[in-house]
Image: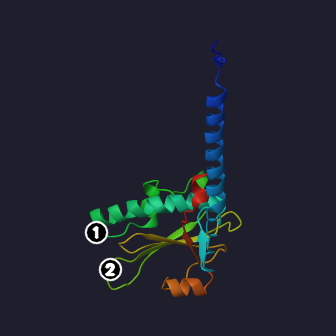
Amino acid sequence: MHHQIVRRAGAERETLWVLLAAGAILASATLAVGLRAAPDADAPLAAHLVDSRTGLTAAEQGLYADLKAAGEEIAALRTAEGRAPTPEELAAEALPPFAADPSAAARGGHAWTLAETDDGTGDGIVYAGVSAAPELAGSLVLRLDGHGADIWLKRAAEAPPAPPEDAALTAAGWKRIVSTFTAGVTR
């Protein structure tokens, strides 16, 4: 007589292999995360720079955005007309922040002036906005040089030095507004 042991049908062995594979995956993922280098700390900005996301008030952020857009419009108007438009002409076209409307008053009520600088190329245009309420938004300078716009800020009701070059602005306490992008921007 021959005896044969027949095991019952079950999935214990397959379950064990699946659990072991899942454990191996979790262990390797934990090891990979643990060994991954921490991101470098953000380098602090230079003393003459201010971050547009974290260093400006809400009113200043709105003015900064308006000035970035206005810089492109001013460049197009200058190309079309052959000269830089005056702040009064920009206000007549209701171009923020030059337009005298309720939002301008709520964001510091800036008085805008125009100066064309002699940078040798004839491209230098400077719009200075002196704030009537520096506690809401500081005074601003929009410099256009044919390559883009630079925007400077000083939290005082003060006109920029003449000529408004980097060294003179920095020495007078003005700060250039820059946009920094880090991993925290997308979160």
Residue 49 on image: x %, y % = 59, 75
Asked if residue 67 lies left or right of residue 54, the reply is left
Residue at point 65%, 56% (across, down) = 31
Classify the position of the N terminus by image quarter.
top right
Residue 183 on image: x %, y % = 58, 59
**Which residue is labeled 1 in the image?**
82
Q: Nearer the viewer, residue 28 or 159?
A: 28
**Which residue is labeled 2 in the image?**
122
Q: Quadrant of residue 53?
A: bottom right
Do we see residue 97 in this rendering? no
Q: Quadrant of residue 75?
A: bottom left
Q: Say few, some or many: other residues with alpha carbon within 10 Å of mark 2 (under 14 / 14 to 19 / 20 or more).
A: few
Does 78 sit above or below residue 6?
Answer: below
Q: Residue furthest front?
A: 1
Does 128 sit above or below residue 36?
Answer: below
Does 73 sit above or below residue 175?
Answer: above
Asked if residue 114 lies left or right of residue 102, the reply is left
Residue 85 on image: x %, y % = 38, 66
Identify which amino acid the numbered label 1 is placed on. Answer: Gly
Identify which amino acid the numbered label 2 is placed on. Answer: Gly
Q: Nearer the viewer, residue 132 or 185?
A: 185
Do we see residue 4 in this rendering? yes
| Label 1 – label 2 distance at C-alpha | 11 Å
